[in-house]
Image (tube, coloured by chain):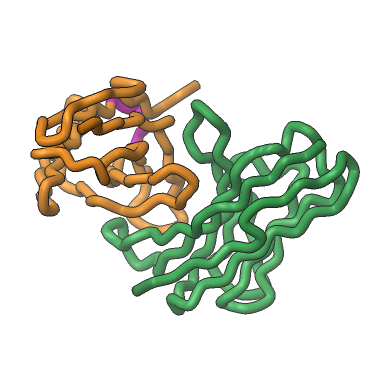
Chain colours: A orange, B green
Amino acid sequence: KTQVEQSPQSLVVRQGENCVLQCNYSVTPDNHLRWFKQDTGKGLVSLTVLVDQKDKTSNGRYSATLDKDAKHSTLHITATLLDDTATYICVVGDRGSALGRLHFGAGTQLIVIP
Amino acid sequence: EAAVTQSPRSKVAVTGGKVTLSCHQTNNHDYMYWYRQDTGHGLRLIHYSYVADSTEKGDIPDGYKASRPSQENFSLILELASLSQTAVYFCASTTGTGSAETLYFGSGTRLTVL
């Protein structure tokens, strides 16, 4: 059973627009949540890690929130660029150490058009 | 900049043949992982290792072996490749010291079994 659900499955936006990606999960315990960016044919690159019960992070044009009570996270991308075209993957870690399991979502494919 | 290098980048193998995928990291990380990615699904853990000369089974180890001859190198071995093992394989590494530690991924190996 899929424990990390991402929506939408795909999204097309115009360059300069903002967008929001959603991640809902049922993983228990939920120690932390990560967002990754995966360019086509490339590996995953870490964008941010959220740890606290209600957490917020900001990394340039990327900002993320986590609400562990709702088991929900969002990734906001502001003023999108063509280079933001990629798949964004939500990952929930069930422990605070590297021996814990990471539960991967299938990703949201974002396409930014001129 | 942390680096994880996978080889080969792509591989075509015949059913029943032996395949070895290699991963090399220069990050001085203790933890290394092998994941597979199938279209429309999240990454799944095959094997991992937290020290040289030792490997552990992940969530889907059947049909795969792993080898960690040194801290820097981690191989994934398919003794008898099957059609169902066609996928993209990713290696990753981390220090393993905490939940906020960055996870570094290689660029992936696209394996096609015919």
The residue located at (88%, 48%) in the rendering is: B17
In the image, residue A96 lies at what x, y percent?
33, 54
Q: From the viewer's perspective, is A16 left or right of B58? A: left
* A110 within the magenta span: no
Magenta segment boundaries in residue numbering: A24-28
Q: From the viewer's perspective, is A95 left or right of B71? A: left
Of residues B87 and B92, the one nearer the viewer is B87
The residue located at (42%, 58%) in the rendering is: A98
In the image, residue A84 lies at what x, y percent?
25, 42
Q: How many numbered discs, if any?
A: 0
Q: From the viewer's perspective, is A50 left or right of A104? A: left
The residue located at (40%, 65%) in the rendering is: B96
Q: Which corner quadrant of the image does residue A26 belong to?
A: top left
The residue located at (57%, 71%) in the rendering is: B24
Q: Is residue A50 visible?
A: yes
Q: Which corner quadrant of the image does residue B94 belong to?
A: bottom left
